[in-house]
Amino acid sequence: MFWKKKHQPATRILLVEDEPAVLASLKDRLEMNDFIVLTASNGGEGLSTALGERPDIIITDLMMPIMGGLEMIEALRKSETGKCIPIMILSARRDQKDMELAAALGVVDYLIKPFEMSELLGKINDVIENCYSSQGL
């Protein structure tokens, strides 16, 4: 299980994934670890949800209909609301160019599918700890 400090509020994660089975499975696993999970099935929905809901972390796929993950991240980084939200990528794409572009956009991590849930939870924990320590909490 994932451990969170008692003084931390429930972390809100926006999960952007176009595969319904993957989205449902990840949502369930994250909720079992006490996260509040918002979902979107493409980058356009993800952008709208991120700007409206201001999640603590965004986890997104890259290849999606309507708007891909990198396009969504580019749009978020141009907005006042989205420029500082930590973003992680979960993708089957192993292309070095995508990884470099993601890094240039300030993505905090890039996990390649398939992945271990424990690895994802550990990376989320790292983001939470870094956010709280940088805020002096």
Image (tube, rainbow, N blue to C red):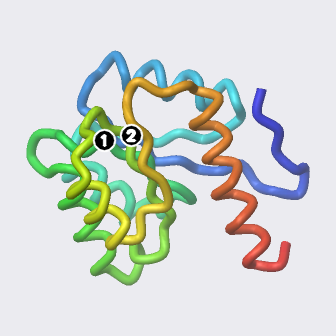
Determine contact: label 1, label 2, CB under 8 Å. Answer: yes
Q: Is residue 51 above or below residue 65?
A: below
Q: Which residue is drawn at 48% across and 67% down?
A: 85
Is label 1 in a helix, a strand or a loop?
loop
Q: How crowded is mark 2: few (under 14 residues within 10 Å), some or many (20 or more)?
A: many
**Residue 71 picture location, percent across and down:** 18, 61
The residue at 69%/57% (across/down) is: 128
Q: Residue 53 occupies which quadrant of the picture? A: bottom left
Does residue 8 appear left or right of residue 120 in this picture?
right
Name the kind of residue labelled 2 in the image. Leu
- Would you name the residue on which mark 1 appears? 61
**Disc 1 and disc 2: Cα gap in Å?**
5 Å
The amino acid sitting under disc 1 is Asp
SS at badge 2: strand
Residue 30: horizontal and vertical position, in percent?
A: 59, 31
Question: In the figure, is residue 34 to the left or right of 19?
Answer: right
Q: Nearer the viewer, residue 133 or 65?
A: 133
Outermost left residue: 66
Looking at the image, which residue is at 13% across and 51% down? 67
Up/down of 69 relative to 136, above or below: above
| Circle 2 residue | 90
